Image (cartoon, grey):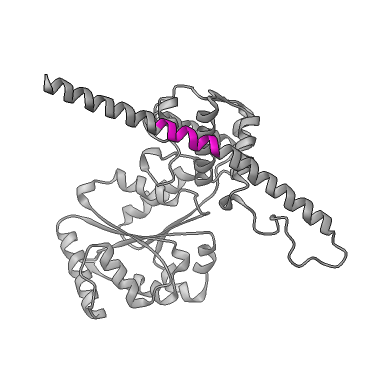
Amino acid sequence: MYEDYYRFSAKPFQLNPDPRFFFGSKGHKRAMAYLDYGLSLGEGFIVITGEVGAGKTTLVRNLFRQLEAHNLVAAQLVSTQLDAEDTLRSVAASFGLEHEGLTKSALLKNLEDFLTAATRQGKRALLVVDEAQNLTPRAVEELRMLSNFQNDDRSLIQTFLLGQPEFRGILQSPDMQQLRQRVVASYHLGPLDMDETRGYIEHRLRTVGWQGTPSFEDEAFAVLHRFTGGIPRRLNTTCDRLLLFGFLEEKSHFGEQEVNEVITDLKTEVAHQDFHGATGINHHAPEGSSLNGDAALLTQRIEQVERSVNRILPIVRKILYTVSERNTATEDGTASEHRDAAH
């Protein structure tokens, strides 16, 4: 909705990973260097960890974009609690291979033949496993065994493991010893600092044609950094809502007040609520606690929800009005074409 208002070519803060918006922070640049080094070795496992929304998937997709597309065969697997055989089936399916109803030996034979053929064609086979912290020891063992496929002392497949911070601890367990020996590069992706947060926001805006409108006060960037913790996905969510707010309120400048107003609305929504005691409702009140205090907090929460609803209603009205105007314009144009054709 706000893209036309601010004359953007696309939404600058979409949630889907898109290598066009890759921002080279200090951490991301260093991670890219580690990935490049690991790829140059052409074997083993490369491990990237970071908080949810830190940009791990975008990082890998940006790396793939830099590789020769016609020399690359890449597949992505989102890890869940799969057993060993299901892991193999999922890998085969990710590469587009037959996998239903096959025995384990047949699955392995299909995978080896596929990887061998890709290597003969001069192609590099890469497997990206997301949410690696959910891998079971048996699933890890199956992935490790795939790295044993070789041709003329060259590994037929290289695997990227992307996981949340706890995966670093999992790797240190005795069950992961053999995997650790196959890791050729690893990096932990941390949050953006204050300056990088500003650079990240401005970079994404410039990517869609931003010419300085809307403008941002320095304090607006500071508030955004504090609220999001410098996590890119959280920044995307908050900045997207801020631009929608600006469109509805017809604002071309954002300061601390505007950002705080949007943050107040976001805090009433499920995705941004703190479930560790921040709801203001004590279901098991200890002796001596104040029920009046609980009631006051509940009233405050209800008032926040009411304010959020009151802000959403104008959004809905404006969206419906805009869609109606576009449909009317389309219908008028179609009717005009029919009249011209009749004459």
Instruction: Indicate whether 34 appears above or below 264.
Output: below
Foreground residue among 36 and 276? 276
317 within the magenta span: yes
Name the main secondary structure of what is drawn in magenta: helix
Instruction: Indicate whether 297 appears above or below 335.
Output: below
Q: Residue at x 45, y 43 (%)?
A: 29
Q: Quadrant of the C terminus?
A: top left
Foreground residue among 143 and 250? 250
* Res 151 → quadrant: bottom left
Please identify the residue farthest to the right as the structure is shown: 288
Q: Residue at x 59, y 42 (%)?
A: 309
Foreground residue among 158 and 137? 137
Instruction: Specify whether residue 20 is in view.
Output: yes
On screen, residue 61 versus residue 172, left or right, reads left
For the image, the number of numbered tags is 0
Whole-percent x, y for residue 187 in the image: 47, 54
Task: Point out the stretch of residues depicted in magenta.
Answer: 313-322
Instruction: Indicate whether 157 appears above or below 137.
Output: above
Q: Residue at x 52, y 73 (%)?
A: 173
* Res 3 → quadrant: top left
Instruction: Indicate whether 208 appears above or below 287.
Output: above
Whole-percent x, y for residue 320 in the image: 43, 35
Q: Residue at x 18, y 24 (%)?
A: 337
Whole-percent x, y for residue 58 in the image: 40, 47
13 within the magenta span: no
On screen, residue 302 versus residue 158, left or right, reads right
Instruction: Specify whether residue 200 is in view.
Output: no
Foreground residue among 306 and 126? 306
On screen, residue 22 versus residue 313, left or right, reads left
Whole-percent x, y for residue 132 in the image: 44, 64
